């Protein structure tokens, strides 16, 4: 298992140079059966990461470019009347794929953004009074431009809470950018990627996440972190039960990726900024600042 995970990370690293930590976080998000939000400036490799994950994991992949005039039917699908049969026939939208890239999701209206809520939570969509199941596994990677850029809409809290993680890729390292200058072509590398696992193997890996053991003292640490966000005057909104479970699932996946069958406090701390940063808000600063203070204010071992 460890060899497969290392090979997956290495393959994606050939496409997304110098971003091993972010690649592992994205993989942990997928193994936790969560959804990933990537917030960054244009041109940082957000789309490349999504495409590379789909290639290496053997997932069907569709990309939707979100715009201000997009409608929910553009994502979910629509029923069209066919004269020959005299009946309406449903045409599936791009949401019916195993990995959906919602590119620049915050450039669409809140109405269109909300079309993904049921899909992300229930793995199904309700259209024309009928419930339709989505493929398994189902994984949404959404990219988001910073809100100070023109033409963006803030994602509502209900939408943000459905993303297990939010990460940022940031600028490339000096060595990675030098390699790009010297002719390393990420797009050419992307075309060479081959699946490392099939769907059955991927689902088995997802099942192993739940088997990672967490001691009572470790669960106590998680409870203290969550309780602190709910009681601290710095946090206007604390972690919800969904957010607390997301933290535990992500930490278990992080431990599995690093070859451990049990949780360590370091696993919780490694994923906490990405799981809690977009969920916390308050007068004490943005989510990232609140998470940083949270890790300093809550001891690993109870006093």
Image (tube, rainbow, N blue to C red):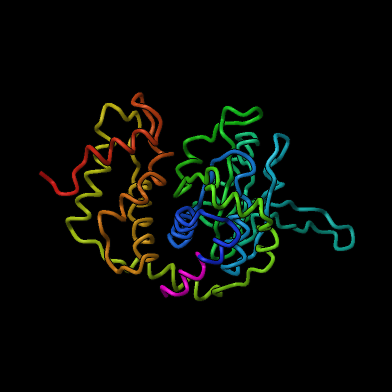
Residue 240 spot, x, y in % from top left: 35, 42
- Foreground of the two, 19 or 126: 19
Say above or below: 249 vs 224: below
Q: Write the start and end of the magenta stretch as one range.
A: 1-9
Q: Position of residue 121 (x, y in %)?
A: 49, 51
Main SS, magenta residues: helix
Query: In the rendered view, does 190 fall on the left or right side of 142?
Result: right
Q: Is residue 43 magenta?
A: no
**Residue at 50% across, 71% down:** 7
| Residue 6 falls inside the magenta stretch | yes
Which quarter of the figure has residue 187? bottom right
Instruction: Give left or right: position of 231 versus 203.
Output: left
What's the residue at 19%, 51% (across, down)? 220
- Comparing 110 with 53, the one in front is 53
Toward the viewer: 171 or 230?
171
Image quarter hosting the N terminus: bottom left
Name the image quarter holding the C terminus: top left
Q: Residue 256 at x, y = what percent? A: 36, 66
Residue 57 falls in image quadrant: bottom right
Is residue 280 shown above or below 201? above
At horizontal 65% and vertical 27% (from top left) the residue drawn is 150
Q: Is residue 68 left or right of residue 38?
A: right
């Amino acid at each position: 298992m460890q060899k497969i995970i290392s090979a997956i990370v290495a393959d994606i690293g050939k496409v997304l140079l110098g971003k091993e930590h972010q690649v592992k976080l994205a993989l942990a998000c997928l193994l936790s059966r969560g959804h990933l939000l990537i917030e960054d400036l244009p041109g940082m490799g957000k789309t490349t990461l999504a495409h590379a994950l789909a290639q290496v994991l053997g997932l069907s992949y569709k990309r939707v470019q979100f715009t201000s005039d997009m409608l929910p039917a553009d994502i979910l699908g629509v029923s069209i009347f066919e004269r020959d049969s005299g009946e309406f026939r449903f045409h599936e939208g791009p949401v019916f794929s195993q990995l959906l890239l919602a590119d620049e999701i915050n450039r669409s209206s809140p109405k269109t953004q909300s079309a993904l809520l049921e899909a992300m939570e229930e793995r199904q969509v309700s259209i024309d009074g009928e419930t339709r199941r989505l493929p398994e596994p189902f994984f949404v990677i959404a990219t988001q431009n910073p809100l100070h850029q023109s033409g963006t809409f803030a994602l509502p809290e209900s939408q943000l809470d459905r993303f297990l993680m939010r990460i940022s890729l940031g600028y490339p390292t000096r060595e990675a950018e030098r390699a790009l200058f010297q002719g390393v072509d990420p797009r050419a590398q992307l075309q060479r990627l081959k699946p490392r696992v099939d769907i059955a193997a991927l689902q088995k890996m997802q099942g192993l996440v739940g088997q990672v053991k967490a001691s009572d003292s470790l669960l106590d640490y998680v409870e203290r972190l969550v309780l602190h966000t709910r009681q601290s005057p710095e946090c206007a909104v604390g972690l919800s039960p969904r957010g607390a479970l997301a933290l535990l699932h992500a930490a278990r996946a992080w431990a599995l990726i690093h070859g451990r069958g049990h949780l360590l406090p370091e696993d919780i701390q490694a994923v906490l900024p990405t799981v809690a940063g977009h969920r916390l808000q308050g007068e004490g600063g943005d989510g990232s600042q609140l998470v940083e203070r949270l890790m300093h204010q809550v001891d690993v071992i109870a006093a």
